[in-house]
Amino acid sequence: MKTLLKFLLILLIFGSIQGSEAQIFKRLKEKAEKVISGKKNVEEEVEKNPTFGSVFLTHSNIYGSVDIPEVKKINAEQTNDSYNFSTSWWSHDADIQDGFYLSVKTTEDLRHDRNEDKAVKRTFKIPEEATLKLSYDPLLPHYDKNKEDYKRAVTDDYQTYDVSKGEVTIDVLSEDAIQISFNGRVSLRKIVRLSNNSEDYSERYYEASIKGGIDGTSPQFINNTTVKKKEDSAQNSIGYTVNEAPISTAEPDTYQFTFETKVKVTVPEQNRSYDMSYLLNPSEKYIGLKVDMGAYSEEEIAGESIIIMDKGNSHIFVETQGMKMQISQNMMGGQKMQNPTDQMENYDYTNLEKTGETKTILGAKCYEYTMSDSDVKMNLWVAPEVNLPNWFIQNREVLKGHIMEYTIVSKDGNMTSETIAINDNISKTINPKEYRKMF
């Protein structure tokens, strides 16, 4: 319970409890100016990172074999119907993705140290039974020890892709070790510049095959399984609707949103409020958080910023002065943001209580719920007649209705979020290929 409520508090207001929101876009602007050239001072020594494994990748053409010797501790999350594996590694020094995310659809316990047949290897087909995303720079600039004054933090050969068709095998999964092998078809990117130092370039993609392995020690196991109850059919009486079993109509490799909930977040310690919007698609697990950059940068930067949280990663898309940019989460202050839908849908909500108090918000009758522990208290006002997805608790077995307002009281800070408008018929699409990547 404590983890859930503190996660909410920190996530909802971009860490503004610390009073840093006014500096976020200043740092963004300063860093963008430095990284446009894609270079980094090599006088800073390459530090040896603590490693919990290694990775090898073999490409069918161009890059050949690539070995990454430094890997962070691998997370292994078990839910009711899947295993999710993820971590970061060091192939470059830019503030963009560098690691992998693997999701396997299974209700079985994949741990070898808890099964009688400890030598069994389980193989899953991609994309039918598993999805695998890889991000890395095959030229490994992180390990470049040349003596030039500057080196690139990341090269034009940087790759991030989903394996389109293939298979993945869980060779070993235990308290002490994890080994994953895979192979499949991928689409690799090639940057074509007008000249060596030109900022103008085009992107081309070509098909290739990839095979590789991830070898780690002491994985971090996360148990997010829960007992499921039978879901009742939803009813709607005041106009907000969402299909019980929606079908995604988004184009591949794009983010599409059909609902927008506008909220006002008030932080008493700062004596100010923030306006923002949650963008949702009931067909998908990713969510978007939209803000007016001018409100967070004292009008220094005008435009719109949307943070999309998807599969444990954050993607930040900025549109300002006719430019579209995709920037990393570290450029936004270094705070990692994960998808709260993934994180929270399997929490233990046995402490959630209905108080019997009611009030009306935007014409909808709302019922009060509370959750608390020794450090944090949370009050929720839920409208059962508003049949819209919530941005964090989307499990209707836990909470039926839309959360219209909530208040968090914590030793880390207090906040209130109030719904001020609901748009249930929007069409907002983010196509990452239209945004220039700022490393």
Image (cartoon, rainbow, N blue to C red):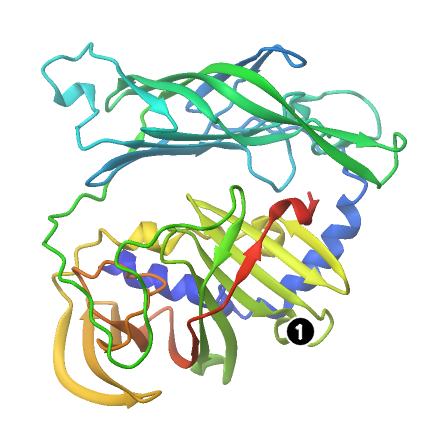
Name the foreground residue: 307 vs 373: 307
Question: Looking at the picture, which amino acid does disc 1 mark?
Answer: Gly
> x%, y% of residue 63?
65, 14
- The image quarter containing residue 165 is top left
Q: Residue at x 38, y 66 (%)?
A: 9
Q: Residue at x 13, y 62 (%)?
A: 232
> x%, y% of residue 148?
84, 25
Left or right, 203 with reference to 310: right
Q: Which residue is mark 1?
A: 294
Residue 71 drawn above or below residue 239: above
Residue 139 drawn above or below residue 258: above
> x%, y% of residue 372?
20, 69
**Disc 1: CA contacts within 10 A as few (<14), some (14-19) or many (>=20):** some
Secondary structure category for the residue under label 1: helix
Left or right, 62 with reference to 83: right
Which quadrant: the C terminus? top right
- The image quarter containing residue 110 is top left
Residue 154 drawn above or below residue 374: above
> x%, y% of residue 44?
71, 34
Q: Residue at x 29, y 63 (%)?
A: 5
Name the foreground residue: 412 vs 423: 423
Which quadrant: the N terminus? bottom left
Left or right, 227 with reference to 37: left
Residue 70 visible in rendering: yes
